[in-house]
Amino acid sequence: MSAPYFTLPEFKYVKPQTLEEALKILAENAGEAKILNGGIGVLGFMKERMIEAKILVDIKGIKELKKIEYMPGKGLVVGATVTANELLQYLEKNPEIKKKFSALYESTSDLADAILRNRATIIGNILEGLPYTDAPGPAILFEAEVKAVSTRGERVLPVEGLVLGPMMTRLEPDEIVTEILYKEPPAGARTGYVKFNPGLEYGYVNVAALVANPDNPQKRDVRIVITSATTLPFRPKAAEEVFKQDIPFEKAAELAAKKIEEEIEPLSDPYASAEYRRYLASTLTYKLLIKLARGE
């Protein structure tokens, strides 16, 4: 007899102590086993019958997945089981790295609340694939890549395009994401994150942005990632291309904001209409870009 809706169905719980052991379990039970990391996403989806799992493989006991390492010139590596609060503590203890990855720090600070940040992992927040999560925007902004490992070997996948929808990714059923690499931003780049969420955990619109060399059109590097407004993270490439024109930065930012209004296909729900999200995406992006360009 199946369990009532919004209670957990029966499953087998296993907690391997090594990556090899975890990979073997997944290989032998492909399609029936799911990874349990922070657990916030997968358990909720199981309660709502959005996913099925006969076996939950708890990877929190695998020591090699609990790592944070900055490699100069390459970027910041965050292991699969690192929680949001652990990442915040690391960045606060390393102010120069925090400055390089400001958008990552700001988005992680905005992720849920302090209690959930003790449990939620950065990689889990990305892979659950909900439109309103905070981690995907900065990951795409810093051109992050994940390492996916199985008994067949390992491969590296960009975060941009990795998620296809709620609990749907390009990962194979027997793969474990062991780490994510946030690539080193351009020299002198400023990054930031803004979340519009009046009184709510989730934002109506979230914007992550990077600005380098704002006063030099030949060397400008501007990146924009908008989340919460659309089903999947939105990278407005046409808006980014505007900054390659030989025009003042503020004028380029105005034109980019208009491009976003034209390109974006926003969600509509009880919290915010599509048109309101369109306005917010354009306005918040413009304000964040100007703030970063001015070094405020």
Image (cartoon, grey):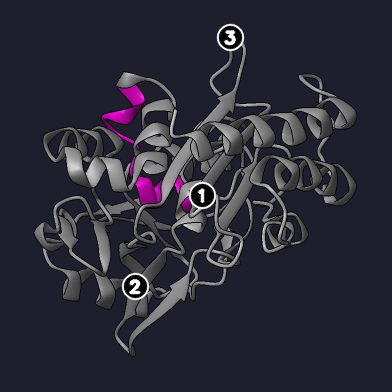
In this rendering, the label closer to the viewer, 1 or 2? 1
| Alpha carbon separation for disc pair 1 and 2 | 27 Å
Q: Is residue 203 magenta?
A: no
Residue behind mark 3: 199
**Residue 211 image label:** 1
Identify the residue shown where x is 74% and y is 58%: 242
The mark found on residue 246 in the picture is none
**Residue 257 appears left or right of 11:** right
Q: Where does label 2 land, which residue?
A: 147
Q: Residues within 10 Å of mark 1 (few under 14, many from 20)?
A: many
Magenta region, residue range = 115-127
For the residue marked with disc 1, what is the amino acid? Val
Discs 2, 3 touching: Cβ within 8 Å: no
Helix, strand or loop status at disc 2: strand
Q: Is residue 51 above or below residue 245?
A: above
227 lies above or below 63:
above
In this view, the residue farthest toward the top is 199
Q: Earlier in the sequence, mark 2 or mark 3?
A: 2
Query: Which of marks 2 and 1 precedes in the sequence?
Result: 2
Q: What is the three-letter code of the residue carrying label 2?
A: Lys
- The residue positioned 18% from the left and 70% from the top of the image is 19
Residue 252, x across and y down, in percent: 73, 48
Residue type for callout 3: Gly
**Residue nearest the observer in this picture, 31 or 286:** 286
Count residues near mark 2 (Cα–Cα under 10 Å), then give few for <14, some for 14-19, many for 20+: some
Asked if the magenta segment contains residue 116, the reply would be yes
Q: In the rendered view, does 258 fall on the left or right side of 140? A: right
Q: Quadrant of residue 62?
A: bottom left
Percent across and percent down for residue 127 are 49, 54
| Residue 216 point in image, percent of width and height | 55, 58
Task: Mark 1 or mark 3: name the one nearer the start of the chain.
Answer: 3
